[in-house]
Amino acid sequence: MEALPKRKPTRLQGFDYNSIGMYFITICTQNRRCLLSRIVGTGVPARSGDGLVNYGKLVGTGVPDCPKVELTKYGAIADKYIRQMNDFYDHLSVEAYVIMPNHIHFLVFVKENGQSGTPVPTTNVTRANSSFSKFISTFKRFCNKEYGENIWQARSNDHIIRDREDYEEHLRYIRDNPKRWRYDELYAEE
């Protein structure tokens, strides 16, 4: 039997993930199945019968055929629990998010130190008890209970927001993700 490949740690070694700060988090569906939403609209202005661009025809968002997110039943459940998480946790808030077909991006703000129970967390305590790790596991658990199955990958990806410019870049990434779906590294045919 072949040994499984050794996974690289996804967390920044030595960083206290319970500390106050902003984090960009991505969670994916298992096998990147497109269960959460559909991206509708081509991103190309509508054309008239003679092939000319028809700028007079505005679709949905007021932009010519602008791609937008259309949630599935799974996505609607995820959206419901994301919105409830701000009420559930006093010490963190979801600042922005987007539900893509096979993943969700969040900007999460940890307002006060998480509750690890130790002043300087060890690596194991940090992994097990970081504020947004609890948030993610609670979110997945609530969704899975309503779905009746587990649809999520076990791991998530995170990025520590370093400054205002980094924050603005990730906020823009969330806002523009539906427009860039076909070029996204997580893109999959639906």
Image (cartoon, rainbow, N blue to C red):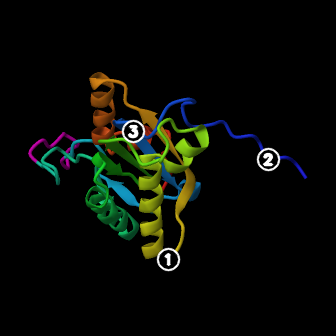
Residue interval drawn in magenta:
48-56
**Residue picked out by circle 2:** 4
Earlier-in-chain disc, 3 versus 1 = 3
Per the rendering, the mark at residue 34 is none
- CB under 8 Å between callouts 1 and 2? no
Is 186 left, or right, of 110 in this rendering? Answer: right
**Disc marking residue 148:** 1
- Mark found first going from the N terminus, 1 or 2: 2
Does residue 49 appear anywhere in the picture? yes
Circles 3 and 1 in contact, beta carbons < 8 Å:
no
Q: Residue at x 28, y 34 (%)?
A: 172
Cα distance, mark 3 to mark 1?
Answer: 28 Å
Q: Position of residue 33 (x, y in %)?
A: 52, 58
- Secondary element under disc 1, as helix, strand or loop, is loop
> Is residue 90 placed above or below 120 in the rendered structure?
below
Callout 2 secondary element = loop
Q: In the depicted view, which residue is nearer to us: 146 or 172?
A: 146
Name the residue type under label 1. Answer: Gly
Q: Position of residue 26 (x, y in %)?
A: 45, 45
Residue 102 shows up from this direction: no
Q: What kind of residue is marked 3? A: Phe
